[in-house]
Amino acid sequence: MKRLPCSLWFLLLFAAGGLVLFIHQQDLSEMVQQQGPVHHQVMIKGFGIDFNLEEMKNCRKKRLKRGHQTIHLIPPPQKKPHSTGGVQLYFEFLYLFEGYNQNQHTFSNGSHQSWKKLSDILEARRQLMKEMCAKYKSSISRTITRHHVKHLFVEDKYKLLYCQVPKAGCSNWKRTLMVLAGQASNTQSIKHDTVHYGHHLKKLDSFDRQGIMHRLETYTKVMFVREPLERMVSAYRDKFENPNNYYHSLFGKPIISKYRVNPSWTALKTGSGVTFKEFVQYLLDVHRPVGMDIHWEQANQLCNPCLIDYDFIGKFENMEEESNFLLRWTGAPPNLTLPSFKDRNPTDKRTSMQLTQKYFSQVSTLERQRVYDFYYMDYLMFNYSKPFKDLY
């Protein structure tokens, strides 16, 4: 049988949209008849395409020459970031296809290099997490309970587990999960209250133990984090500087009552107007008048990464690129990208590190140090630098 050139193999794969590939990891004798070269069956978003695996491996080792430009194809990483077939095979070809222009039949210069760099960064984050867990959390129980998975959302169609870390792109990721689950046609049409109070997404702790463990073992586990003090300031601004009856009543009243000298009757009744210094006092108080909240709880406490081996640890600071990398990785529709709109208090300036430093200028050096200590494990585990030079 006449062999097809390498370029046609690539075009064949792109014909189905360049979506995620997965390979059946069964005994080859059960998959194909032993006639001629061994073929594997690849499914590309519902289209079955046969290809010769060895021939594809040879193609990967060659150079693609387009005009005066020669591009070296990058081999897959030595260690696969996930054990399921779809992710494995996707990483086999990710660097080949990213940046490919179907009209001009060219690869954009450096595109595969940028994806390679990002995948290396993601793997380095996972390794750092394991090192920090081994160093600081080696004595914790290895038993996973419902409590440990209560913040993980489940998307069964694309086999995703997403741990919500509020103020780190959480709302937009929930919108994306709803679209993946077929509950909405696009992310822009989903209102804030629908995302958070509509109960459209399943939580992992709603399953029985067998269902929980099966998904932990086979689904892609994802979390996104943010610079801890910046995230904390973002939470304060959202919940206390803007109208919010729930947080003003539940948290504002007891905070003002305990930490404000001579509070007014109006402040005590409404709970409005909590200052940043009062919020810091509450956060650092071992005898808080009201408990912790998910919006300013440490990310490592919400997602338990020393118990749950996350396949993907993304960062808010590079949210767009890393989220879209993840969506392509999981085989999401090619037109689906993470939305970037700010649906609560859209006129407010986004919280930045510069703004964070301005807020922390309102508290003492000791309080600033103690807040850093409060989030210290997040700084270690997720590799964030000290936000102030005078911290020790």
Image: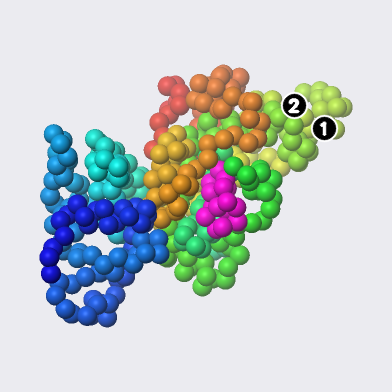
Numbered label attached to residue 79: none
**How packed is label 1: few (under 14 Cα within 10 Å), some, or many (20 or more)?**
some
| Residue depicted at 27% across the width and 57% down the height | 12
Q: Mark 1 and 2 residues: CB-CB less than 8 Å, in contact?
A: yes
Estimate the spatial distance between the alpha carbons at disc 1 and disc 2, rounded to whole Å. 9 Å
Instruction: Tell me which corner region of the image, top left, top right, bottom left or bottom right, holds residue 294.
Output: top right
Q: Which residues are magenta?
A: 172-187
Q: Is residue 271 left or right of residue 206?
A: right
Q: Does the magenta portion include 125? A: no
**How packed is label 2: few (under 14 Cα within 10 Å), some, or many (20 or more)?**
some
Q: How is the image coloured?
A: rainbow
Where is the N terminus found, in terms of image quarters?
Answer: bottom left
Please state the horizontal and vertical placement of residue 50, each as a whole percent of the image: 26, 67
Can I make out residue 76 in this image? yes
Can I make out residue 84 in this image? no
Numbered label attached to residue 270: 1
Please state the horizontal and vertical placement of residue 390, each as a whole percent of the image: 44, 21
Numbered label attached to residue 273: 2
**From this viewpoint, which residue is outermost toward the right?**
265
Q: Does the magenta portion include 177? A: yes
Task: Give whichever of 69, 177 is nearer the camera.
Answer: 69
Q: Is residue 317 left or right of residue 260?
A: left
Task: Give whichever of 368, 227 is nearer the camera.
Answer: 227
Check disc 1 and give the amino acid type: Thr
Check disc 2 and give the amino acid type: Gly
Please state the horizontal and vertical placement of residue 330, each as a whole percent of the image: 41, 55
Instruction: Tell me which corner region of the image, top left, top right, bottom left or bottom right, holds residue 189.
Output: top right
Give above or below for 59 relative to 353.
below
Please state the horizontal and vertical placement of residue 332, each as a whole percent of the image: 44, 53
| Residue depicted at 30% across the width and 65% down the height | 49
| Residue depicted at 32% across the width and 55% down the height | 15
